[in-house]
């Protein structure tokens, strides 16, 4: 008697990594082994890359596909922008923090002006 396969077709691709180590472990490994250069053959979510940026350690990661490269670059740039504004961060840059704060204030003013101009009042139509 032959058994029929009851598996359903996969809609989503199977993840490459299920359980990724925490950022603190990556930082500790860099510190313990006095790393000066990291060659990462499976960068996954970029925690090791971010730990290297924070400790100013050279890093080279081999990504799986172009989409992975774009997502990792975007994530690292977002983390960098946030970290450069935090005074407790080793990447803090006061000039950047002031410029970013000024840009945020300008954006907020523009949004408020746009909201005031774009308000639709049904009673104004006659």
Image (tube, rainbow, N blue to C red):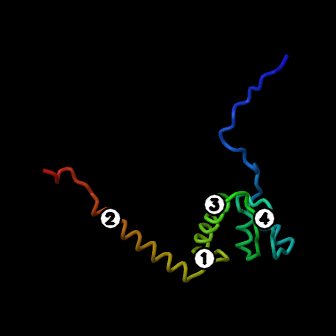
For discs 2 and 1, the disc positioned in front in the rendered view: 2
* Residue 45 in the image, given as x and y percentages of width and height: 70, 58
The span from disc 3 to disc 1 (Cα, nearest Å) is 26 Å
**Residue at image point 74% right, 26% down:** 6
Task: Label 1: state its secondary structure.
Answer: loop
Q: Are marks 2 and 1 in contact (CB under 8 Å)?
A: no
Q: Is residue 38 above or below residue 10?
A: below
The span from disc 2 to disc 4 (Cα, nearest Å) is 45 Å
Q: Are marks 2 and 3 in contact (CB under 8 Å)?
A: no
Marker disc for residue 87:
1
* Residue 114 in the image, given as x and y percentages of width and height: 32, 64
Q: Residues within 10 Å of mark 2 (few under 14, many from 20)?
A: few
Q: Nearer the viewer, residue 85 or 44?
A: 44
Marker disc for residue 114:
2
For discs 2 and 3, the disc positioned in front in the rendered view: 3
Q: Residues within 10 Å of mark 1 (few under 14, many from 20)?
A: few
Q: Earlier in the sequence, mark 2 or mark 4?
A: 4
Q: Earlier in the sequence, mark 3 or mark 1?
A: 3
The span from disc 2 to disc 1 (Cα, nearest Å) is 32 Å
**Residue at image point 64% right, 58% down:** 67
Q: Residues within 10 Å of mark 3 (few under 14, many from 20)?
A: few
* Residue 117 in the image, given as x and y percentages of width and height: 27, 63
Name the residue beneath numbered marker 4: 26
Q: Is residue 17 above or below residue 31?
A: above
Task: Label 2: state its secondary structure.
Answer: helix
């Amino acid at each position: 008697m032959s058994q029929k396969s009851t598996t359903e077709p996969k809609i989503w691709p199977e993840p490459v990594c299920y359980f990724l180590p925490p950022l603190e472990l990556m930082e500790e490994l860099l510190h313990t082994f006095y790393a000066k250069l990291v060659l990462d053959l499976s960068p996954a979510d970029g925690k090791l890359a971010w730990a290297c940026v924070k400790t100013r350690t050279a890093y080279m990661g081999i990504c799986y596909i172009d989409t992975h490269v774009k997502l990792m670059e975007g994530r690292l740039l977002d983390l960098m922008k946030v970290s450069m504004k935090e005074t407790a961060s080793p990447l803090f840059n006061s000039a950047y923090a002031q410029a970013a704060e000024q840009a945020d204030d300008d954006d907020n003013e523009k949004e408020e002006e746009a909201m005031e101009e774009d308000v639709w009042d049904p009673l104004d139509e006659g």
